[in-house]
Amino acid sequence: MENENKNVSQEPVSSSNEHEVRVEKVEKMRSEGIEPWPYREPITATCQQVKDEFVEDGDEKKYDVAGRVMTVRLHGKTGFCTIQDRSGRLQVYIRKDLVGDEPFVFFKNYVDMGDIVWFSGKSFKTKTGETTIKVEKFKLLSKCLYPLPEKFHGIADIEIKYRQRYLDLITDAGSKQKFIKRSYIVRAMRNFLDSRDFLEVETPMLHPIPGGAAAKPFITHHNALSSDFYLRIAPELYLKRLVVGGMDRVYEINRNFRNEGISKKHNPEFTMLEFYMAHEDYHFSMELVEQMFRNVVEKTCDSLQVPFGKYEIDFSKPFERLSMKASVMKYANASEEDVSEANIDKLIAKHNIELENKGASWGYKLVALFDEIVEPNLIQPTFITDYPVEISPLAKRKEDDPNVTARFELFIAGMEIANGFNELNDPFDQAERFKQQAVAKEAGDTEAHHYDADFVLALEHGLPPTVGVGVGIDRLTMLLTDTQSIKDVILFPTLKKK
């Protein structure tokens, strides 16, 4: 028994002897025939329901509640403790003459902060006006073998916060509320799309060929098929196959994986909403995205003016729209002639921008200027349109300008939040762009697309005019919870092994 219990965890979170003390309590309980992790006890209410249902001068109502013990204050033959369940916290009052001598001694000797305990009793209000349960019976449901941290501060505790998210959720109500709000955000997006005749679908996570975005994939191997597969970087090419098949409005909310760096805005595993609709274009989808964002903010925030860091993001006003070239002209204080193919190198040099590829095309140079000069200034919701063809291998060219695509990205607070475009449905054009991407890959571009012959075959069967949009759920949650690091809105962010 001693050996079994004292090796519950290989890495104690506390350097004190509290863990050993609690393990000894477990051993004593079991020697007395008491199970520290017994079967369930029925509950009739949450902590919040007890508070909500209390009626002054009404009949005392009996409740069975259960929660984690967050505070304990014993004074002789009486005591108070605070328990916490999914709805919040509630005070309970325990008295020796009500519960009996032995149970009171057990509570005093064996119940610690962090334990999960079932209580049965009637509600009343203390002199200070706090709704409380007067305990008649109780039962230990789950023994906690470590003391709970009071709060997080400092680098070491941040590590605990991410690696042991359960401790963060138990002790930090604000952090827990962010994840509850995240769930509400996703629900609001689902409801918005469902109400507009979209169908939620699921597509593969394992891809024989990576595609749908410019990114470096994770590679794995399937033994039975003796083949390498790739964790998906985007569901795009599969969702468009469904549109070919006649599912004109589809969406998916799921994980993508990109073998790239980790930062405050990037996690290798992240959640995206992607939706596709036939017989509409990117102008329509910009309107739809703006409506959806406003609807989500209305459903999940107190106001359409949302604080984020030192800014206040205003979702009540129409989102600004600028072409990429116009945005560079605006924020670089440049003329049309300055951003022309003949003069763009001078503008690049003026702003001390280093190009990885010295022989880069005009489109790549325009994007470099945009990334450096424009993107950090896009605080209020702004649609940037007309992306160069070179960086948009799956987007349809604009009818009046074949050098750019019918594409937009939505930026808020200097972050890209959404990306959408008219889908390229010409199989010959798509095949040629795949070939160009394959050449780039051979030249060392690890993020370039592979040639996907199966997708080209699908296009040869006829993809109707279609627009698609992707929305980053993690970054949107950051915005709507005033959170500066993506790790704080992902329950279990990717971390280096200990």
Image (tube, rainbow, N blue to C red):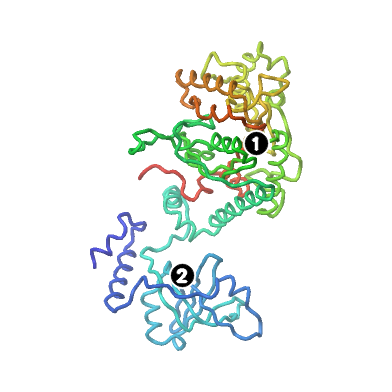
Is residue 14 rendered to the left or right of residue 357? left
User: Which dot, 1 or 2, sits closer to the camera?
Assistant: 1
Q: Which mark is residue 277?
A: none
Q: Secondary structure at mark 2?
A: strand
Residue 311, position as x, y percentages in the image: 67, 43
Residue 443, position as x, y percentages in the image: 46, 17
Instruction: State whether residue 201 is above or below residue 352.
Output: below
Q: Residue furthest right?
A: 317
Is residue 364 rendered to the left or right of residue 298? left
The residue beneath circle 1 is 411
The residue drawn where x is 50% and y is 29% is: 454
The C terminus lies in quadrant? top left
Instruction: State whether residue 444 is above or below residue 4.
Output: above
Q: Residues within 10 Å of mark 1 (few under 14, many from 20)?
A: many
Residues at circles 1 and 2 in contact by the CB criterion of under 8 Å: no
Q: Earlier in the sequence, mark 1 or mark 2?
A: 2
Q: Secondary structure at mark 1?
A: strand
Question: Quadrant of the rendered structure where residue 129 is?
Answer: bottom right
Q: CA distance from mark 1 to mark 2?
A: 44 Å
Q: Residues within 10 Å of mark 2 (few under 14, many from 20)?
A: many
The residue drawn where x is 32% and y is 54% is: 11
Q: Residue furthest top?
A: 342
Q: Amino acid at mark 1?
A: Phe
The residue beneath circle 2 is 69
Q: Residue furthest front?
A: 461
